[in-house]
Protein backbone atom coordinates (compact mmCIF):
# COMPACT_ATOMS: atom_id res chain seq x y z
CA UNK A 1 0.00 0.00 0.00
CA UNK A 2 1.62 3.18 -1.18
CA UNK A 3 0.84 6.26 0.83
CA UNK A 4 2.32 9.60 1.71
CA UNK A 5 3.23 8.20 5.10
CA UNK A 6 6.77 8.88 6.20
CA UNK A 7 8.92 5.99 7.30
CA UNK A 8 11.81 7.47 9.18
CA UNK A 9 15.02 5.62 8.32
CA UNK A 10 17.33 4.52 11.07
CA UNK A 11 20.41 5.22 8.95
CA UNK A 12 19.44 8.85 8.41
CA UNK A 13 18.00 9.95 11.72
CA UNK A 14 19.92 9.74 14.95
CA UNK A 15 17.95 9.82 18.14
CA UNK A 16 14.98 8.14 19.70
CA UNK A 17 13.25 10.19 22.27
CA UNK A 18 12.18 8.73 25.55
CA UNK A 19 10.34 10.32 28.42
CA UNK A 20 12.40 9.52 31.48
CA UNK A 21 9.79 11.03 33.77
CA UNK A 22 7.32 8.83 35.63
CA UNK A 23 10.03 6.20 36.11
CA UNK A 24 9.55 4.84 32.56
CA UNK A 25 12.88 3.51 31.36
CA UNK A 26 13.94 1.33 28.48
CA UNK A 27 17.41 0.18 27.48
CA UNK A 28 18.43 0.49 23.85
CA UNK A 29 20.34 -2.77 24.38
CA UNK A 30 17.01 -4.58 24.73
CA UNK A 31 15.24 -2.84 21.83
CA UNK A 32 14.48 -4.15 18.32
CA UNK A 33 12.93 -2.21 15.45
CA UNK A 34 10.68 -3.85 12.84
CA UNK A 35 9.85 -2.01 9.59
CA UNK A 36 8.93 -2.81 5.98
CA UNK A 37 11.91 -4.17 4.03
CA UNK A 38 13.80 -1.47 2.17
CA UNK A 39 11.58 1.25 3.60
CA UNK A 40 12.26 4.67 2.11
CA UNK A 41 14.07 7.06 4.41
CA UNK A 42 11.55 9.79 3.75
CA UNK A 43 7.98 9.52 2.40
CA UNK A 44 5.77 9.93 0.53
CA UNK A 45 5.47 6.59 -1.22
CA UNK A 46 6.68 4.14 1.40
CA UNK A 47 4.91 0.95 2.36
CA UNK A 48 3.18 0.51 5.69
CA UNK A 49 2.61 -2.60 7.79
CA UNK A 50 -0.49 -4.13 9.31
CA UNK A 51 -0.66 -3.43 13.01
CA UNK A 52 -1.85 -7.04 13.44
CA UNK A 53 1.82 -8.01 13.14
CA UNK A 54 2.25 -6.72 16.68
CA UNK A 55 0.18 -9.63 17.98
CA UNK A 56 2.38 -12.17 16.20
CA UNK A 57 5.56 -10.58 17.51
CA UNK A 58 4.19 -10.34 21.06
CA UNK A 59 3.76 -14.13 21.11
CA UNK A 60 7.48 -14.74 20.56
CA UNK A 61 9.30 -16.01 23.62
CA UNK A 62 11.07 -13.35 25.71
CA UNK A 63 9.25 -10.42 24.09
CA UNK A 64 8.11 -8.10 26.87
CA UNK A 65 6.39 -5.31 24.94
CA UNK A 66 5.55 -4.33 21.36
CA UNK A 67 4.90 -0.63 20.66
CA UNK A 68 3.14 0.53 17.49
CA UNK A 69 3.91 3.78 15.66
CA UNK A 70 2.62 5.57 12.58
CA UNK A 71 4.70 8.44 11.17
CA UNK A 72 3.13 10.76 8.59
CA UNK A 73 5.36 13.33 6.92
CA UNK A 74 4.16 16.60 5.41
CA UNK A 75 6.49 18.82 3.39
CA UNK A 76 7.24 22.39 4.35
CA UNK A 77 6.35 24.55 1.31
CA UNK A 78 8.91 27.20 2.13
CA UNK A 79 11.74 24.70 2.82
CA UNK A 80 11.22 21.72 0.55
CA UNK A 81 13.87 19.64 2.32
CA UNK A 82 12.14 20.12 5.67
CA UNK A 83 9.34 17.93 6.96
CA UNK A 84 6.66 18.25 9.60
CA UNK A 85 6.04 14.88 11.24
CA UNK A 86 2.66 13.87 12.61
CA UNK A 87 3.21 10.79 14.75
CA UNK A 88 0.64 8.43 16.17
CA UNK A 89 1.49 6.11 19.03
CA UNK A 90 -0.24 4.22 21.81
CA UNK A 91 -0.14 6.51 24.86
CA UNK A 92 1.21 3.71 27.09
CA UNK A 93 4.25 3.47 24.82
CA UNK A 94 7.40 5.59 25.02
CA UNK A 95 7.72 8.39 22.41
CA UNK A 96 10.30 7.18 19.88
CA UNK A 97 11.74 7.94 16.46
CA UNK A 98 13.99 4.94 15.89
CA UNK A 99 16.15 2.48 17.81
CA UNK A 100 19.55 4.18 17.50
CA UNK A 101 19.80 5.87 20.86
CA UNK A 102 17.88 6.82 23.92
CA UNK A 103 17.45 10.58 23.95
CA UNK A 104 15.82 12.29 26.86
CA UNK A 105 13.20 14.91 26.07
CA UNK A 106 12.36 17.83 28.24
CA UNK A 107 8.71 18.58 28.91
CA UNK A 108 8.39 22.35 28.76
CA UNK A 109 4.75 22.56 29.70
CA UNK A 110 1.65 20.41 30.12
CA UNK A 111 1.56 16.62 30.22
CA UNK A 112 2.18 13.38 28.35
CA UNK A 113 -0.51 11.52 26.44
CA UNK A 114 -2.56 9.11 28.58
CA UNK A 115 -4.43 5.89 27.76
CA UNK A 116 -7.76 7.69 28.12
CA UNK A 117 -6.69 10.06 25.31
CA UNK A 118 -7.18 7.33 22.69
CA UNK A 119 -9.17 8.59 19.72
CA UNK A 120 -9.15 12.21 20.86
CA UNK A 121 -8.01 15.25 18.89
CA UNK A 122 -5.24 16.18 21.30
CA UNK A 123 -1.49 16.48 20.83
CA UNK A 124 1.93 17.04 22.30
CA UNK A 125 3.87 19.51 20.18
CA UNK A 126 7.62 19.77 19.69
CA UNK A 127 9.27 23.19 19.74
CA UNK A 128 10.14 23.01 16.03
CA UNK A 129 6.54 22.25 15.14
CA UNK A 130 5.29 24.95 17.49
CA UNK A 131 7.53 27.52 15.79
CA UNK A 132 5.52 27.03 12.58
CA UNK A 133 2.52 28.41 14.49
CA UNK A 134 4.44 31.53 15.53
CA UNK A 135 4.25 30.60 19.19
CA UNK A 136 0.47 30.17 19.26
CA UNK A 137 0.73 26.39 19.88
CA UNK A 138 0.53 26.67 23.66
CA UNK A 139 -0.94 24.23 26.16
CA UNK A 140 -4.71 24.50 26.28
CA UNK A 141 -5.04 26.13 22.88
CA UNK A 142 -6.71 24.58 19.84
CA UNK A 143 -4.58 24.71 16.68
CA UNK A 144 -4.90 23.41 13.11
CA UNK A 145 -3.44 19.93 12.69
CA UNK A 146 -1.34 21.23 9.80
CA UNK A 147 0.63 24.50 10.05
CA UNK A 148 0.13 27.11 7.34
CA UNK A 149 3.55 26.29 5.87
CA UNK A 150 2.59 22.65 5.22
CA UNK A 151 2.22 21.39 1.67
CA UNK A 152 -1.37 20.14 1.51
CA UNK A 153 -1.58 18.70 -2.00
CA UNK A 154 -2.88 15.11 -1.88
CA UNK A 155 -3.81 15.55 1.79
CA UNK A 156 -7.46 14.67 2.53
CA UNK A 157 -9.77 17.61 3.16
CA UNK A 158 -10.66 16.14 6.56
CA UNK A 159 -7.00 16.45 7.57
CA UNK A 160 -6.64 19.97 6.21
CA UNK A 161 -9.59 21.12 8.31
CA UNK A 162 -8.76 19.13 11.47
CA UNK A 163 -7.90 20.90 14.71
CA UNK A 164 -6.25 19.55 17.85
CA UNK A 165 -5.96 20.72 21.45
CA UNK A 166 -2.39 21.06 22.73
CA UNK A 167 -1.84 19.22 26.03
CA UNK A 168 1.96 19.36 26.18
CA UNK A 169 5.08 20.95 24.68
CA UNK A 170 8.49 19.28 24.53
CA UNK A 171 12.08 19.80 23.41
CA UNK A 172 15.07 17.48 23.27
CA UNK A 173 17.67 17.42 25.99
CA UNK A 174 20.12 17.74 23.09
CA UNK A 175 19.21 19.45 19.78
CA UNK A 176 17.38 17.13 17.36
CA UNK A 177 15.66 19.26 14.73
CA UNK A 178 13.52 16.62 13.02
CA UNK A 179 12.27 15.19 16.29
CA UNK A 180 11.23 18.64 17.47
CA UNK A 181 9.31 19.24 14.22
CA UNK A 182 6.86 16.66 15.46
CA UNK A 183 3.27 16.55 16.63
CA UNK A 184 2.40 13.52 18.78
CA UNK A 185 -1.18 12.25 18.75
CA UNK A 186 -2.89 9.01 19.82
CA UNK A 187 -2.28 6.28 17.22
CA UNK A 188 -5.93 5.64 16.42
CA UNK A 189 -6.52 9.37 15.91
CA UNK A 190 -3.80 9.57 13.23
CA UNK A 191 -5.02 6.34 11.59
CA UNK A 192 -8.56 7.70 11.36
CA UNK A 193 -7.63 11.17 10.12
CA UNK A 194 -5.35 9.92 7.33
CA UNK A 195 -7.47 6.93 6.34
CA UNK A 196 -4.82 4.46 7.53
CA UNK A 197 -6.84 2.30 9.89
CA UNK A 198 -4.93 -0.81 10.94
CA UNK A 199 -1.63 0.50 9.50
CA UNK A 200 1.65 1.36 11.24
CA UNK A 201 5.15 2.43 10.18
CA UNK A 202 7.21 0.78 12.90
CA UNK A 203 7.09 -1.77 15.67
CA UNK A 204 9.48 -1.29 18.58
CA UNK A 205 10.04 -4.53 20.44
CA UNK A 206 11.46 -4.73 23.96
CA UNK A 207 12.95 -8.05 25.08
CA UNK A 208 13.45 -9.20 28.65
CA UNK A 209 17.25 -9.07 28.51
CA UNK A 210 19.91 -7.54 26.22
CA UNK A 211 21.50 -11.01 26.03
CA UNK A 212 18.30 -12.34 24.46
CA UNK A 213 18.10 -9.74 21.69
CA UNK A 214 19.99 -11.65 18.97
CA UNK A 215 17.86 -14.73 19.42
CA UNK A 216 14.58 -12.81 19.54
CA UNK A 217 15.49 -10.79 16.44
CA UNK A 218 16.18 -14.01 14.54
CA UNK A 219 12.87 -15.47 15.74
CA UNK A 220 11.06 -12.35 14.48
CA UNK A 221 12.78 -12.63 11.08
CA UNK A 222 11.69 -16.25 10.81
CA UNK A 223 8.12 -15.43 11.85
CA UNK A 224 7.64 -12.45 9.52
CA UNK A 225 9.78 -13.36 6.52
CA UNK A 226 11.80 -11.27 4.07
CA UNK A 227 9.17 -8.57 3.66
CA UNK A 228 10.36 -6.92 6.87
CA UNK A 229 13.63 -5.53 8.20
CA UNK A 230 14.42 -6.45 11.80
CA UNK A 231 17.22 -4.19 13.04
CA UNK A 232 18.96 -2.85 16.11
CA UNK A 233 22.16 -0.90 16.79
CA UNK A 234 25.42 -2.72 17.44
CA UNK A 235 29.10 -1.87 17.69
CA UNK A 236 29.54 -2.24 13.91
CA UNK A 237 26.39 -0.35 12.95
CA UNK A 238 22.87 -1.58 12.40
CA UNK A 239 22.18 -5.34 12.44
Image (tube, rainbow, N blue to C red):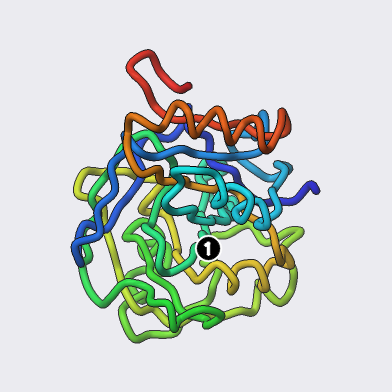
Is 203 rendered above or below residue 90? above
- Residue at the image point whose x is 48% and y is 66% from the top: 90
Element type where label 1 sits in the image: strand
**Residue carrying label 1:** 88
Residue 212, horizontal then vertical, whole percent: 39, 32
In the image, 150: left or right of 65? right
Quadrant assignment, res 193: bottom right
In the image, 221: left or right of 25? right
In the image, 184: left or right of 229? left
Is 93 rendered above or below residue 7? below
* Total labels drawn: 1
Residue 195, horizontal then vertical, whole percent: 74, 67
How dense is the environment of label 1, judged by Cα within 10 Å: few (below 14), some, or many (20 and up)?
many
- Residue at the image point whose x is 44% and y is 41% from the top: 98
Residue 64, horizontal then vertical, whole percent: 42, 51
In the image, 70: left or right of 37? left
Amino acid sequence: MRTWAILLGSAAIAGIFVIRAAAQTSSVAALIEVRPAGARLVGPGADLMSEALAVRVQQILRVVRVEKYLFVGVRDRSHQKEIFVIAGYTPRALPRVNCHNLEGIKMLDGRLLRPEDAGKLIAMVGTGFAAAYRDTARVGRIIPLLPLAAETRDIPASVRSAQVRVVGRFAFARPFALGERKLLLPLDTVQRLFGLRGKVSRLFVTVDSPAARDGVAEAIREALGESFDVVYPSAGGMR
